[in-house]
Amino acid sequence: MIDYIPVKILFNFGALKVYSWGLFFAIAFLTAFFLILMEARKKKIDTLHIYNLGFLTLLGAVLGSRLFYVIENIFYFIGKPLEILSFWDGGLTSYGGIFLGLLFVWIYTKRNTDLKFLQILDISAPYIVLALAIGRIGCFLNWCCYGIGSDLPWAIKTIDDIPRHPTQFYDIFANLAIFFVLIKLKNRKQQGEKFSRFKKNSFKDITFIHESDFFDKEGSMFLSFAVMYSTLRFFIDFLRDHHSYFLGLATSQWVCILVFIGSIIAIANIDKIQRKDFGWN
């Protein structure tokens, strides 16, 4: 067991308080944004689009994640409605922010036909999960999103509470593992694109060289992220303390099941998604 005192406020600038969760949320977002910006420049995507998408994603992440958190804990907030606006004190649901952020990105790409929705998702996927890992550091410092009771040697005990699973660290390690897998897949995909261009220029008369595997297709990176994240999050959430359950599972676990099933269906039909216009550009 490890004794721990949460660090909700890192430091003050006069009357201004810098909250640990809010600071790491900002660090996570800016880290992901600038890495995505660098990738977009390599793909010759207009950087103005990335700045616009960054703003829309931030808006969607904040509003969506808070909205889903409030819905998950609606009975608590009915009694304390003013706390709904306390964004800086933690209490955001990551998948809520991802969903609303994706919706805003989709709307933007539909209005700007020089952008491809699936390409933007693939570029962003590794850095979204990296941002999720960084954000969990703020969760640990703030001591939110903690786990159920535990007697393991690394269980964390705060003042006036029982020892608990540090599920924030479980999420950090899981997200970092996904990040490194996606980076490896990204590098493999880039090498494959270079080789594909070489084959196209050098062996124009050979038809079979146009065949490509799953990871050569747009959307593959993001779908891989969705499958891995929903799977690991589902199992980690068995150890996380939730306010409400349905049929023995937390709301987040039901969301993970839906995301996993939807991603598997999309993977199985990725050729159709590539060939037909489903509104994905």
Image (spheres, rainbow, N blue to C red):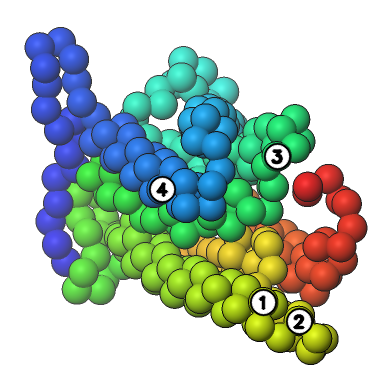
Instruction: Compute the Cα span from label 3 to label 2.
Output: 28 Å
Residues at discs 2 and 1 in contact (Cβ within 8 Å): yes
> Disc 1 marks which residue?
201
User: What type is the residue that disc 4 sits on?
Assistant: Met
Lower sequence index among marks 1 and 3:
3
Looking at the picture, tell me which residue is in the foreground, 185 or 26: 185
For the point 16% across and 66% down, the residue is: 1
> Disc 3 marks which residue?
114
Q: How crowded is the residue under tag 2: few (<14 C-alpha within 10 Å), some, or many (20+)?
A: few
User: What type is the residue that disc 3 sits on?
Assistant: Asp
User: What type is the residue that disc 1 sits on?
Assistant: Asn
> Disc 2 marks which residue?
204
Q: Nearer the viewer, mark 3 or mark 2?
A: 2
> Horizontal and vertical percent for residue 60?
57, 32
> Disc 4 marks which residue?
38
Asked whether residue 218 is in view, the answer is yes
Q: Nearer the viewer, mark 4 or mark 2?
A: 2
Label at residue 11: none
Lower sequence index among marks 1 and 4:
4
Lower sequence index among marks 4 and 3:
4
Instruction: Compute the Cα span from label 4 to label 2.
Output: 32 Å
Q: How crowded is the residue under tag 4: few (<14 C-alpha within 10 Å), some, or many (20+)?
A: some
